[in-house]
Image (cartoon, rainbow, N blue to C red):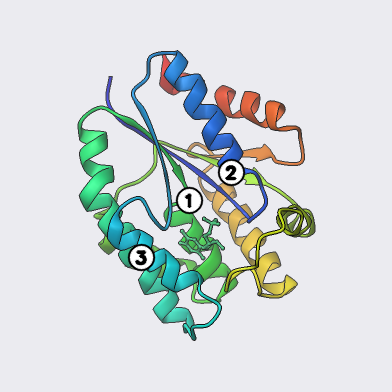
């Protein structure tokens, strides 16, 4: 069976990490060689860039921010993701290019097209086989995130208009590519979200 890239997208607090863990368990139980990764991260350079880009003590302009995420992604693709897919693994990736399109293209107002072009260069055009978009109201996402009791990182400190713009960009991306991007109602229980997600990738499992 060929390797598959399944990405999980959505606002902070949508439940991406919980879904990734649940899906990994289900796929493993079916004998699928699966690996769960997150962005930015997964390899040393990208984990270090993650620390920098999330640090509230640093000034990071919108363009620099887009470039740092793209650089972290480029290294992950070259060092780990492309080889894993070539070896036939299924990779569950918590955020990928769509996060940059939504956060930097939409949220920061840099435009979807400019960010898409930057990321085409960074990833060599790698596109997910399926993207599970966990749709949540920005206020609910914020409330869930605040309930975790962790200190807010640099992006999480932004105001409501930033997150509203990101949510809108995600909606547009989902509408543009309905075959790849599948919307899942993240307000449901984690079990129901997992069941929906399995339904949305079932054709890839056949
Ligand atoms: P997370 O792993 O907790 O979701 O943190 C990643 C943060 O970085 C989150 O606030 C979303 C943001 N982000 C972007 O703005 N652009 C990107 O391309 C990625 C991958 C994440």
Disc ID at residue 16? 2
- How many numbered dots are placed on residues in this image? 3
Q: Give me the residue at 64% from left, 68% from top.
A: 152
Q: Give me the residue at 54% from left, 66% from top.
A: 103
Q: In which quarter of the image is the C terminus?
A: top left
Q: Give me the residue at 57% from left, 68% from top.
A: 106
**Who comes first in sequence, dot 2 or dot 1?**
2
Q: Does the residue labelled 1 lie within 8 Å of ligand 1?
A: yes
Q: Does dot 2 land on a helix, a strand or a loop?
A: helix
Question: Dot 2, how many residues are within 10 Å of its Cα: few (below 14), some (14-19), or many (20+)?
Answer: many
Q: Does dot 1 land on a helix, a strand or a loop?
A: loop
Q: Does the residue labelled 2 lie within 8 Å of ligand 1?
A: yes
Q: Where is residue 60 in the image (x, y as percent from the top left)?
A: 47, 82
Q: Position of residue 174 (x, y in %)?
A: 57, 48
Q: Are marks 2 and 1 in contact (CB under 8 Å)?
A: yes
* In this rendering, position of residue 166 left or right of residue 84: right
**Who comes first in sequence, dot 1 or dot 3?**
3
Relative to 22, say whether 37 is above or below.
below
**Who comes first in sequence, dot 3 or dot 2?**
2
Reading the image, the residue beneath label 3 is 48
Cα distance in 3D space between marks 1 and 3: 17 Å
Relative to 179, say whether 14 is above or below.
below
* In this rendering, position of residue 16 left or right of residue 5: right
Q: Give me the residue at 72% from left, 49% from top.
A: 136
Report the mark closest to the observer, 1 or 3.
3
Look at the image and tell me whether residue 8 can be seen.
Answer: yes
Q: Quadrant of residue 84?
A: top left
Cα distance in 3D space between marks 2 and 1: 9 Å
């Amino acid at each position: 069976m060929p390797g598959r890239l399944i990405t999980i997208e959505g606002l902070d607090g949508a439940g991406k990490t919980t879904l990734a863990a649940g899906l990994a368990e289900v796929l493993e139980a079916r004998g699928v060689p699966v690996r769960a990764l997150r962005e930015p991260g997964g390899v040393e350079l990208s984990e270090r860039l993650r620390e920098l880009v999330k640090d509230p003590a640093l000034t990071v302009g919108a363009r620099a921010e887009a470039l740092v995420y793209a650089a972290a992604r480029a290294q992950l693709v070259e060092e780990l993701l492309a080889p894993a897919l070539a070896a036939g693994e299924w990779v569950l990736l918590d955020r990928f290019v769509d996060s940059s399109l939504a956060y930097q293209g939409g949220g920061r107002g840099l435009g979807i097209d400019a960010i898409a072009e930057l990321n085409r260069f960074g990833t060599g055009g790698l596109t997910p086989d399926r993207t599970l978009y966990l749709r949540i109201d920005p206020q609910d996402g914020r409330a869930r995130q605040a309930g975790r009791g962790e200190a807010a990182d640099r992006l999480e400190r932004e105001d409501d208009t930033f997150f509203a713009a990101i949510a809108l960009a995600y909606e547009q991306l989902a509408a543009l590519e309905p075959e790849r991007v599948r919307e899942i109602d993240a307000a449901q229980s984690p079990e129901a979200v997992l069941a929906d997600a399995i339904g949305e990738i079932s054709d890839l499992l056949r």
